[in-house]
Image (cartoon, coloured by chain):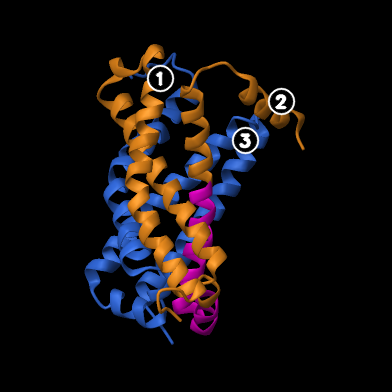
Chain colours: A blue, B orange
Amino acid sequence: MTTTENTPKFVRYESTPWKWMRYSAFLLIPLAWGHVLIQDILVGGHGINLDYVAMRWSLVGWRVYDFFLLAFAFAHGMNGLRQVLFDYVLSARKRHLLAWLLFALWLLISALGAIALIGGVKP
Amino acid sequence: MDSRFVSTISGYAKYKGGKGLLAFLLHRITGLGTLLFLTVHITMTSLVYIYAPLYTRLVEIFQWPVIMFIEILLVFCVIYHGANGLRIATIDLFKPRWLQERNSTRAMLITLVVAIILWLPAAGVMGYNMLKYGFGLFGGE
C-alpha cells in the first residue's frame, strides 16, 4: 500500500503492525511449533524441571532460540490483544491509554523473560 | 459488561457470514488463549533466575492432570492459530487474489482439518503422558 500525505494518520501507523503481524507469523511457525513439539510433545511437562532448564540453557544456541521466541511471540500476542480490544474500545483517548498500558505490560513481561535468559538458572 | 461487547458477541452468533466467520472467531479465541498461557509461562520461567524454589513448586503444579489436559487444548490453539495465520499471511502478503467470499467456507474447513490432523498425534502422545504420569496408568508413577 502506498501512503500519501492524504492518507489518514490511523492508516499510516496501523499498516506497520499489520505487516509485522504477518512477517512474525512466518517466523513463529518454526519457532513456536518447534518449541511446542520439543517441550510439550517430545519431552513433556513431566520431564521439565530446574535441572532440565539448566541443561537446555547450557547451550547458547537454545538461549538465542528462546530469545527470538520471546521477542516475536509475545509482541505478536500483545499486539493481537490490542487489535482485539480496539474492536471494542472506540474512543481515541481510551485507545491511547490502553495502548500504553499494553505496551508497559509487554515491556515488563519481556524484561522478566530476558533477565532469566541472560542470567540463566540460579538455584 | 459493556453493552457494545455484548452486542458484538451476540452479533457474531447471529451473523450469517458463512464459515469464514468461524475461522475469524477461532483465530481470536485460540490467539487469546495462547497469549494468556504465554504471559503465565514467561513470568513463571523467569523465576528460574529470580526465585528458583518457587519455580520448582509451580512446575509440580503444572504436572497436575487437569493442567496436562489444558496443555493438550493449548497445543490445539497453537496449531490452529499457526495454520490459519499462515493462510492469512500468505494471502495478504503474496496472493490477495485467493481471498474470495465463495472460497471462505472451504478455506475454513481445510484449515480446521489440517490443524486437527496435525494435532491428533500430539494429543495422543500428550494424552498417553497424562494417563501415565498424571493417573499412574501404563506403569507410571
Residue B48 part of the magenta segment: yes
Residue B46 part of the magenta segment: yes
Q: Residue at x 60, y 37 (%)?
A: A85
Q: Which mark is residue B104?
A: 1
Question: Which residue is denoted by mark 3 in the rendering?
Answer: A95
User: Along the horizontal axis of the image, is B10 left or right of B69?
Assistant: right
Choose between B46 and A32: the one closer to the eye: A32
Question: Which residue is denoted by mark 2 in the rendering?
Answer: B7
In percent of width and height, residue B138 lies at 40, 74
Q: Residue at x 36, y 35 (%)?
A: B113
Magenta stretch?
B33-59
Q: Which circle, 3 or 2, is nearer the viewer?
A: 2
Give the mark nearest the N terminus, 1 or 2.
2
User: Along the horizontal axis of the image, is B95 left or right of B139?
Assistant: left
Mark 3 neighbour class, 10 Å CA radius: few under 14, some 14 to 19, many 20 or more: some
Q: Residue at x 26, y 21 (%)?
A: B95
Q: Amino acid at mark 2?
A: Ser
In percent of width and height, residue A12 lies at 43, 25
Instruction: Give the main secondary structure of the magenta stretch.
Output: helix
How far is disc 3 from disc 1 in space, using C-alphas? Answer: 31 Å
Choose between B13 and B129: the one closer to the eye: B129
Residue at disc 3, secondary structure: helix
Q: Which circle, 1 or 2, is nearer the viewer?
A: 1
Q: Amino acid at mark 1?
A: Ser
Q: Which circle, 3 or 1, is nearer the viewer?
A: 1
Quadrant of the rendered image containing residue B85: top left
How far is disc 3 from disc 2 in space, using C-alphas? Answer: 20 Å
